[in-house]
Image (cartoon, rainbow, N blue to C red):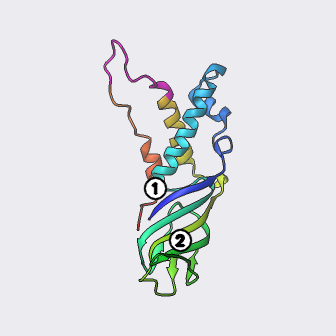
């Protein structure tokens, strides 16, 4: 399934407060705050993309080409499906023959829509910020610190090596494998 986030709350300050970022990086200069905020947003986006989750609330549109009896909805804690549509020939129809399984996060069709194509699903994801696991928070803080410390691509007189990404393990613990 391909998906696009239609709208999402800005959760950066609630998830990783600037005070937490500054304490972790030990960077307290007000001149560096805009750069730290940029790194914080990028770290959150990286963590969400890498783990296939959404932190906070988001409205999502997903699509798949051909009919499948069951379809897994990505991005973690799907709360509800608001609409399912598909093309029957040249006509876009709103479908009502489905149910959503809260446990498996699967959209299960109860009618045969095999003559339909280009399915579109709109759903809502909500992951409370208070339950974001500590290793994910640590992984994002490590990303921010690594990016801040290694913000130049070239260092004169120093051998340049790839930035170590050992903190990726923090994200691997909570990664949802993409499934169709």
Q: Residue at x 37, y 17 (%)?
A: 155
Residue 6, relative to residue 67: is it above or below? Answer: above
**Which sits in the foreground, 148 or 73?**
73
- In percent of width and height, residue 86 lies at 50, 75
Principal SS element in the magenta part? loop
Cβ atoms at labels 1 and 2 below 8 Å apart: no
Quarter of the picture containing the N terminus is: bottom left
Quarter of the picture containing the C terminus is: bottom left
Residue 172 within the segment the image draws in magenta: no
Q: Which residues are magenta?
A: 148-160
Query: Quick check: 50 left or right of 19?
Result: left
Residue 31, relative to residue 65: is it above or below? Answer: above
Check residue 175 in the rendering and tell me which mark sits there, or answer none. 1
Examine the rendering and report whether any part of residue 36 can be seen.
Answer: yes
- In percent of width and height, residue 115 lies at 42, 83
Q: Residue at x 51, y 80 (%)?
A: 108
* Residue labelled with disc 2: 105
Upstream in the sequence, badge 1 or badge 2? 2
Q: Residue at x 42, y 61 (%)?
A: 178
Q: Residue at x 40, y 40 (%)?
A: 166
- The part of the image, by quadrant, that contains residue 61 is bottom right
**Which sits in the foreground, 91 or 109?**
91
- In percent of width and height, residue 179 lies at 41, 66
In this view, which residue lies farthest toward the top? Answer: 157
Residue 140, relative to residue 173: is it above or below? Answer: above
Query: Quick check: 93 left or right of 168?
Result: right
């Amino acid at each position: 399934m391909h998906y696009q986030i239609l709208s999402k709350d800005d959760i950066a300050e609630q998830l990783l407060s600037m005070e937490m970022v500054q304490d972790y990086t030990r960077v307290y200069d007000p001149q560096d705050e805009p750069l730290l905020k940029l790194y914080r947003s990028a770290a959150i986006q990286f963590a969400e993309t890498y783990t296939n989750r959404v932190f906070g609330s988001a409205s999502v549109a997903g699509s798949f080409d051909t009919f499948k009896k069951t379809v897994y909805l990505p991005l973690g804690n799907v709360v509800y499906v608001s609409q399912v549509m598909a093309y029957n020939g040249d006509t876009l129809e709103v479908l009502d023959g489905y149910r959503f399984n809260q446990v498996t996060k699967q959209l299960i069709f109860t009618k045969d829509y095999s003559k339909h194509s280009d399915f579109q699903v709109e759903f809502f994801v909500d992951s409370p910020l208070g339950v974001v696991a500590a290793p994910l928070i640590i992984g994002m803080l490590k990303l921010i610190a690594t990016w801040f410390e290694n913000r130049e691509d070239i260092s004169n007189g120093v051998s340049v090596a790839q930035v170590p990404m050992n903190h990726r393990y923090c994200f691997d613990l909570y990664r949802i494998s993409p499934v169709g």
